[in-house]
Image (cartoon, helix red, strand yellow):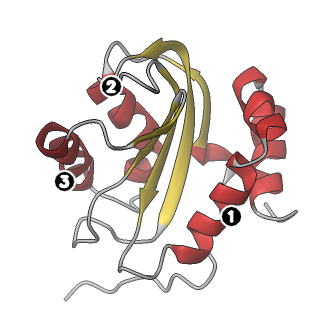
Amino acid sequence: MEVKIMDTDPKLSVDEVQLKAHASNWEEAIQVAAKPLVDGKKITNDYVTAMIDSVKKLGPYIVIAPGLALGHARPSEAVHQTGFAIATLAEPVKFGNKDNDPVDLVVILASTSDTAHLSLLQKIVMFLNDSQNLETLRRAKTREDAKHIAEQINGGDQ
């Protein structure tokens, strides 16, 4: 029997923020953005596959704003711990969303249940709703920039 880690108040770590990552297409953009969660054993590769399969089946619905994709899939055994990761892309990629392509910012959201991600989603939405934060994120280049972004999203905590 596998033990789930409690998701009391998930935080974004500096290692889950990738800046100017490289991806040649939308599938690779999802894989690259999700890599810190896979490496941290918060999700498995099955969750990455589920996110990609969702877009193939339902279309590019995850592109929720100009240049911004929110990768996610249904909670499953492939999610060991609720979390999220952010990747800015060095070169934008097309997801097939005529209104919001190309995408240069990919946020991955993974949840262990239908409700475990709500506080996390609220943090990221509050951050992304501020156009100044979006510009700061898109201009970020260094690990120090990534640390500042993580602290801001976490409400001052890192």
Would residue 60 appear left or right of 20 to someone viewing this image?
left
Which residue does the image show at 64% across and 57% down from the upper left? 125
| Mark 2 lies on residue | 95
Which residue does the image show at 22% across and 41% down from the upper left? 55
Number of the label disc, if any, that sits on residue 46: 3
Q: Element type at marker 2? A: loop
Q: Is residue 20 above or below residue 8?
A: above
Q: Mark 1 vs mark 2: give the one in front.
A: 2
| Mark 1 lies on residue | 123
Residue 27's image quarter? top left
Q: CA distance from mark 2 to mark 3?
A: 20 Å
Amino acid type at image mark 2:
Phe
Would you say residue 143 is visible in this rendering? no
Q: Is residue 126 above or below residue 82?
A: above
Residue 136 placed where, x, y %?
81, 31
Outermost residue to the right: 156
Which residue does the image show at 59% across and 85% down from the upper left? 8
Would residue 35 appear left or right of 123 to someone viewing this image?
left
Amino acid type at image mark 3:
Asp
Residue 69's image quarter? top left
